[in-house]
Amino acid sequence: MSPTEKTTRAGVTDSRPRTPPPHAWRALGHRNFRLFFGGQSISLIGTWMTRIATSWLVYRLTGSALLLGTVSFAGQIPTFIFAPFAGVWIDRLNRRKLLVWTQTASMVQSLALAALTLSHHITIPLILFLSVTQGIINAFDMPGRQSFMVQMVEDRADLGNAIAINSSMVNIARLIGPSLAGMLIAATSEGWCFLIDGISYIAVIASLLAMRINVPQVLKTATSMAHELHEGWTYVWQFLPIRNILLLFAVVSLMGMPFVVLMPIFAARVLHGGPHTLGFLMGAMGVGALASALSLAARKTVRGLIRIIPVSAVVFAIGLIGFGLSHWFWLSIVAVLIAGMGMMQGMAASNTIIQTLVTEDKRGRVMSFYTMAFMGMAPFGSLLAGSLASAIGAPIAVIVTGTVVLLGAAWFFTRLPAIRRVIRPIYREMGIIPVEGGVQS
């Protein structure tokens, strides 16, 4: 039968040519992933509006760089504490049901923040409390979403493309959300951003409920959580590629990514702007990140991605150092665009390789450690960034942290030969690269 033909349920051959999605968007050929893409695209715009509005609200109430870092720390430290335990539960539970609950809890949190802000009852202690609450939710939601990806995209060959499209979605939201938040804050107040975010969760909850998932049977285990946690950690630490990727990712998250926390200071003090300036800076970072994600979506294979990881860290570091040195608006825009490109390229490449290599029975636990490296190190970085900015100024703080990221990239380059020696046999077994003689295993 021709590739353009298919047999209908009645047994009649349909010779009409099928039109699959273009290669760069092939993961959207999976119904469940299309639903997720539509719902999450709407929800993420609200999430980015809340991130910007929270930073601006804290800075407006306090004018303190240290408190900006403290609030960010409070929102992210629960992920560091709870994510490993969440990973054990994710390997045991129905992931779709888990995500419905986490998204619902996030909606309630955003609506509470909106009500308190619009009624002028919001205070720093309340912001801290709600940030901690959201951090606990994220400890389950983020590794849950990453682990659920393989259930939405039935063809494992499309997994990397789905991750790249997901990254594109995040960065389209990063582009739109901060710009909308900047305009809305300037016109009204931060509370309306929180309200829109709360309402936007309805879209992703509806998309999850509409999915038809063939959930593999969850094996009942008699082992304790401590045993499974230790098993997951041992797997990660002894598997050289995943261990080194997560170590570099932790350095980047600790030293590099928290520069976003200092954005209000750069917008107000360095560039002498307001919420519009903050929105433009965040939007430029989103443009750079989106460009990187789209370039990854166009890739046909995971081969070569491992080298992209340290290269992207170098690009990210150059963007950070340039941003710290700049006192001109347009130069700062270019610098954060470069930083966004490097940050997203490394993040998506790391995610794709880990998801490709990990065994299914440990996916939840491995992705929880990925979440720890991504979100779990960020609170310490936020606290460090706020402290450094208070002591030596925000520009010098960003230059220092960018230099550390550069050193981390140099270390990873030295580990590439050993990582490749481990990955090649796995890729051959999976059919990603051919064995000698051109015959795939």
Image (cartoon, helix red, strand yellow):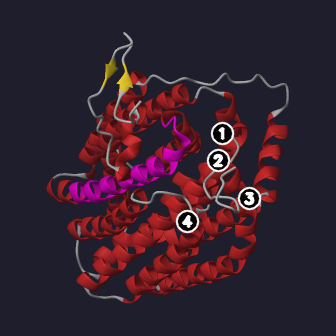
- Residue at the disc numbered 2: 368
Numbered disc 1: secondary structure:
helix
Residue 119 image position (x, y, % from top left): 27, 40
Q: Is residue 116 visible?
A: no
The amino acid type found where label 1 is placed reads: Ala
> Label 1 to label 2, Cα distance in Å?
7 Å
- List the residue tagged with mark 4: 305
Residue 419 located left or right of residue 159: right
Q: Label 3: which residue?
A: 425
- State the CA–CA distance, disc 3 to disc 1: 31 Å
- Label 3, label 2: how far apart the Cα atoms are: 26 Å
Question: Residue at point 47% right, 87% down?
Answer: 396
Q: Are marks 1 and 2 in contact (CB under 8 Å)?
A: yes
Q: Position of residue 295 (x, y in %)?
A: 38, 64
Residue at image point 69% right, 29% down: 92
Does label 4 or label 2 sit earlier along the sequence?
4
Q: CA distance from mark 3 to mark 4?
A: 16 Å
Ranked by sequence position, the earlier of labels 4 and 1 is 1
